[in-house]
Amino acid sequence: MGANVSAELEPAKSAVVTKVDPAEVPSAAWGWSGESRTTFRRAGWVVVVILLAMLIGNHKGHVEDIYLIGFAAVLAGILIRDSFLQGKPR
């Protein structure tokens, strides 16, 4: 451990405006920092539709239907709750 290593970081020189410091999150310099709520919401609704589409099939029992409807309902509830809480501050 004879090397002289400085623990200081250079300030990031970026024109990208983000809510995080690029020194802490390197991907922020490329604009990848932050989640896309709209994309996740759309993907969630696609999954709900796919789960309900699986009700159409050649199965005779209805146990699978109960699980499919249950999972779709829980996911839809989470998505609806998220859309209501979106405008509220964290």
Image: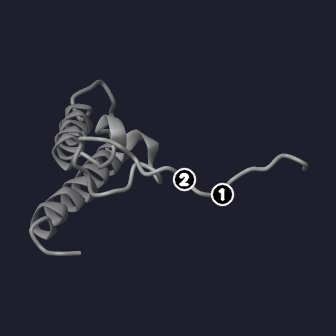
Q: Amino acid at mark 2?
A: Leu
Within 10 Å of disc 2 (Cα), the crowding (few <14, some 14-19, many 20+) is few
Q: Is residue 48 left or right of residue 3?
A: left
Colour basis:
one colour
Is residue 61 shown to the viewer in this render?
Answer: no
Name the residue furthest front: 4
Is 53 placed left or right of 87 in the picture? right
Q: Which mark is residue 7?
A: 1
Residue nearest the observer in this picture, 36 or 74: 36
Instruction: State the image coordinates of residue 53 (x, y, percent, origin top left).
Output: 20, 32
At horizontal 26% and vertical 26% (from top left) the residue drawn is 57
Residue identified by numbered label 2: 9
**Disc 1 versus disc 2: distance between alpha carbons?**
7 Å
Question: Mark 1 falls on what kind of element?
Answer: loop
How many residues crowd around disc 1 within 10 Å: few (fewer than 14), some, or many (20 or more)?
few
Residue shown at 24%/41% (left/top)? Answer: 15
Tell me if label 1 and label 2 are in contact, CB under 8 Å.
Answer: no
**Above or below, 6 relative to 42:** below
Location of the C terminus by quadrant is bottom left
Looking at the image, is 9 positioned above or below residue 56? below
**Residue 26: which numbered mark, if any?**
none
Q: Amino acid at mark 1?
A: Ala
**Residue nearest the observer in this picture, 48 or 85:** 85
Q: Nearer the viewer, residue 80 or 17?
A: 17
